[in-house]
Amino acid sequence: MKKDYYEVLGLQKGASEQEIKSAFRKLAKKYHPDLNKESGSEEKFKEISEAYSVLSDPEKKAQYDRFGHDAPNFGGGASGFGGFGGFSSVDIDLDDILGDLFGMNFGRRKKSKGNQAVDGEDVLVRINLSFMEAVEGCKKSIKIDIEEDCEECHGEGGFDKIECSNCHGTGVLVQQTNSFFGSFQSRTTCPYCHGTGSTMKKTCSSCRGNGRIKKNKEIVIKVPKGVDTGSRIRLSGKGPAGKNGGYPGDIYIEFKVEKHSLFERDENDIYLEVPLTITEASLGCEKEIPTVYDNVILTIKEGAQTGDKLKLKGKGIITEHNGTGDMYVILNIITPTKLSRRQKELLKELSETPLDNSSEFKKFNKYL
């Protein structure tokens, strides 16, 4: 006795067309031999395919609902797979069923219909900036090749549109495919009209039928203040044209910032190493130092040490969206390598006075 087809698909009698298709999708994905290598999966797949071949056909479904497996047109009781004399000719759209399940159409990637709107591709352009250009912001001009809709044919690729004689305006070509579980119809994008369903009597001479023309465009970019290496800005809709009414792509600008000989950046903070003489560090001083914006006078207290860090609030990187950083001054006391005779005499006199009263010297000397 053959199983009830509704039971095979896990449905109740009277299930809708959408319910039948949905059930077949689910079971086909579970038992398809390409995905399920267990024993019996191939037979199970044939069983659900046979059930679907009947229940997806309105005429056969009506006969089955009335007579079951004893329907008069079922070829002697539908003995075995291929019964009903009709499964071999079932119209299952592989692009719609198996293609959706596996993302493939019997080894070929599933293609979208050619007459669908397709947005233009995005483009990435990298620009080098000096350190100060990144800090202050600037304007940069770039030249880039961009595909735009042909002005002559308005992106159509030609003139006098007519219905494609190969696909008869459908945009697809139907092909019969034989497999171990029956014969199916698969659809591929029409190569003559590229899925649009129409062709042109006259090809546009400007774009040679492509509908788009590559142009070298100069674009002026406003670089915002405070960008850093890896920062990006987007020029929306400035990229290549879309197809079939799709939106143009975007241009992404990515920055690479050169290092500075004096300043070092850490996110929005700036670090500056300031050299001091022994006397400036010992006696303290007023020292003029540069920032990324202007020069300022920094007060160095007497007894400064190498590595001391002084903070200048708000003197870091100013950005449009991420606030303002600070500047940190790192002191570095430089020992002279060349001294005049007089300088040596003065240092010798200084060395003969007690200078070892600091806590560092005391901690060290107690082990001597």
Image (cartoon, rainbow, N blue to C red):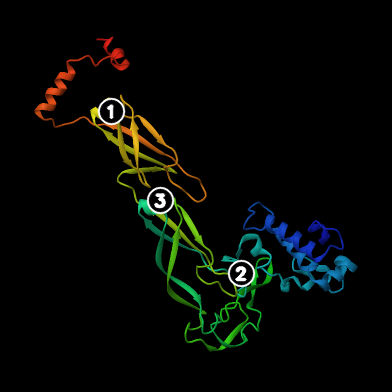
Q: Is residue 47 at least partly visible in the picture?
A: no
Q: Nearer the viewer, mark 1 or mark 3?
A: 1
Above or below — where is 291 with respect to 361?
below
Is residue 310 rendered to the left or right of residue 161?
left
The residue tagged 1 is: 281
The local secondary structure at tag 3 comes to: helix
Which of the pair 300/92 is nearer the observer? 300
Tell me which label, 1 or 2, sits earlier in the chain.
2
Q: Pinpoint residue 328: horizontal percent, then vertical percent.
A: 39, 37
Q: Pinpoint residue 245: horizontal percent, then vertical percent.
A: 60, 74
Question: CB under 8 Å between callouts 1 and 2?
Answer: no
The residue tagged 2 is: 112
* Residue 279 picture quarter: top left
Q: Residue furthest left?
A: 341
The residue tagged 3 is: 135
Tell me which label, 3 or 2, sits earlier in the chain.
2
Q: Pinpoint residue 310: horizontal percent, then vertical percent.
A: 38, 33
In 3D space, how far apart are the residues under numbered discs 1 and 2 (Cα atoms)?
74 Å
